[in-house]
Image: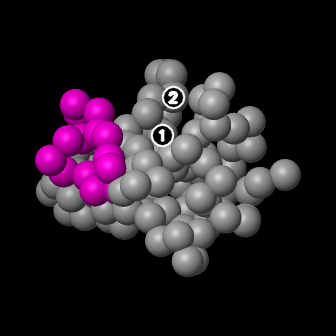
Amino acid sequence: QVQFVESGGGLVQPGRSLRLSCAVSGSINRFYAMDWYRQAPGKQRELVAEVNRDGSTYYSHSVKGRFTISRDNAENTVYLQMNSLNSEDTAVYYCNGRISSGPTDAWGQGTQVTVFS
C-alpha cells in the first residue's frame, strides 16, 4: 500500500510563503501524475495543483500564479511552493498520486496551513 506523508505546513501571515513536501513510498513514476489537494473547513476537498510525468503542470484558478508544484523523481518527493498566501488558502493540504480512476485511496494525514492576520 502506497503512503503519502505531507509536511511543511504552519501558521503564517498574509503575503508570506510556505513550501510543502510530500514523501511517497515507492516510485512516483508509477502514477500518471502527482497532485496536491486541499480541504478547508466545511468545504469539499479540491485539487489545487498537478504535475505530470513529463513535467507539465495544472493549477486551479485560485492558486495560479502564486503556487508552484514540482517533483523529484529520484527522491520520490513532491513539493508545493506557496507564495502570497491569503486567508482563503487556509486548509489541510494533501498529496496523492493519480491513477486511471482518479486519486488513490491512500490519503495521508495532510498538513495544516493557516493564514491569519
Give amino acid for label 1: Tyr
Picture layout, residue 117 above or below residue 102: below
Horizontal and vertical percent for residue 39?
Answer: 49, 34
Q: Is residue 82 visible?
A: yes
Q: Is residue 90 visible?
A: no
The answer to which image quadrant residue 11 occupies is: bottom left
Picture layout, residue 44 above or below residue 56: above
- Give the residue at x 47% y 22%: 43
Measured Cα–Cα span from mark 1 to mark 2: 6 Å
Q: Indicate which disc, 1 or 2, sits on the residue closer to the N terminus.
A: 1
The answer to which image quadrant residue 62 occupies is: top left
Residue count near mark 1 (Cα–Cα under 10 Å), binned few <14, some 14–19, many ≥20: some
- Give the residue at x 51% y 22%: 44
Q: Secondary structure at mark 2?
A: loop
Magenta segment boundaries in residue numbering: 56-69
Horizontal and vertical percent for residue 104?
Answer: 69, 38
- Looking at the image, residue 94 sits to the left or right of residue 105; the answer is left
Q: Secondary structure at mark 1?
A: strand
Give amino acid for label 2: Arg
Can residue 68 be found in the magenta stretch?
yes
Check disc 1 and report the residue beneath it.
37
Q: How is the image coloured?
A: one colour
Please tell me the numbered disc located at residue 45.
2
Return the residue found at the far right.
Answer: 1
- Looking at the image, residue 113 sits to the left or right of residue 115; the answer is right
Q: Are marks 1 and 2 in contact (CB under 8 Å)?
A: yes
Can residue 47 be found in the magenta stretch?
no
